Image (tube, rainbow, N blue to C red):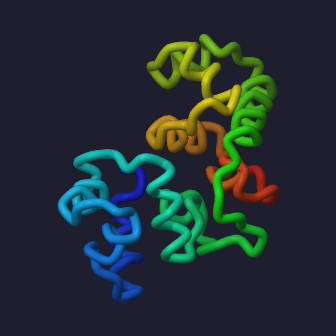
Amino acid sequence: MIYKNNLKLIREEKGISQYSISEILELNKRVYGQYEREYTIMPIKHLNSVCNYLNISIDYVMNFTNQINYSNNKTEIDRVKSGERLKALRKENKMTQAKLASILETAPSVIGGYEKGRRLIATPFLYTICDKYKISADYLLGKIDNPKYLK
């Protein structure tokens, strides 16, 4: 479970339909419904858009914090900053790219691509990293500068 329970609950509490969110994301309602039920994992760029629309943090929807949003929250993900922060986290924990890739069950080149800011961290990898190292997803994505660590 990455976001399934929280996303639906928050959307329903705000009285927003799946259709409304699917329009924001420019997706078919069925595709968004699959994302919300986690039949298909939502790409982080779409999750960010949904969180911005609902005015909630990614940390909150992933159940890393009870704080609904951050006052210093940016709407856009900063790929370069995200890559730098992932690399710093990896070094803080004395890991090679190969070791982190092994934990995430992916290739070291994928980690290299994230660290160079070539692509966004995949949603399940982001969740695993943040859960394991208690680091804020919003921080890791460059959306906030503080707090860095949670719980």
Which residue: 32% across, 77% down? 20
Query: Is residue 113 depicted above or below 4 in this figure?
Result: above
Q: The C terminus lies in which quarter of the figure? A: bottom right
State the image coordinates of residue 6 (x, y, percent, origin top left).
Answer: 40, 67
Q: Is residue 116 left or right of residue 91?
A: left
Tell me what residue is drawn at x 59 percent, y 74 percent: 68
Q: Position of residue 147 (x, y in %)?
A: 78, 58
Residue ID at (66%, 48%): 141
x, y (%) of residue 110? 54, 21
Whether residue 91 is situated above or below residue 63 in the rendered picture:
above
Question: Which residue of the protein is positioned furthest toward the left in this rendering?
Answer: 30
Residue 65 or 11: which is nearer the viewer? 11
Q: Give the image quarter of residue 57.
A: bottom right
Is residue 84 toward the left or the right of residue 130 in the image? Answer: right
The quarter holding residue 84 reads top right
Image position of 115 (left or right of 2): right
* Residue under the image location 71 percent in, 71 percent down: 70
Would you identify the image quadrant in which residue 67 lies?
A: bottom right
- Along the line of sight, the residue nearer the viewer: 59 or 109: 109
State the residue lying farthest toward the bottom.
15
User: Up-down: is 95 above or below 135?
Assistant: above
Residue placed farthest to the front in the image? 26
Q: Decide which of 138, 109 is in the foreground and name it.
A: 109
Q: How many marks are shown on the rendered structure?
A: 0
Residue 144 sits above or below residue 14 on the image: above
Where is residue 125 shown, x and y percent of the image?
Answer: 50, 35
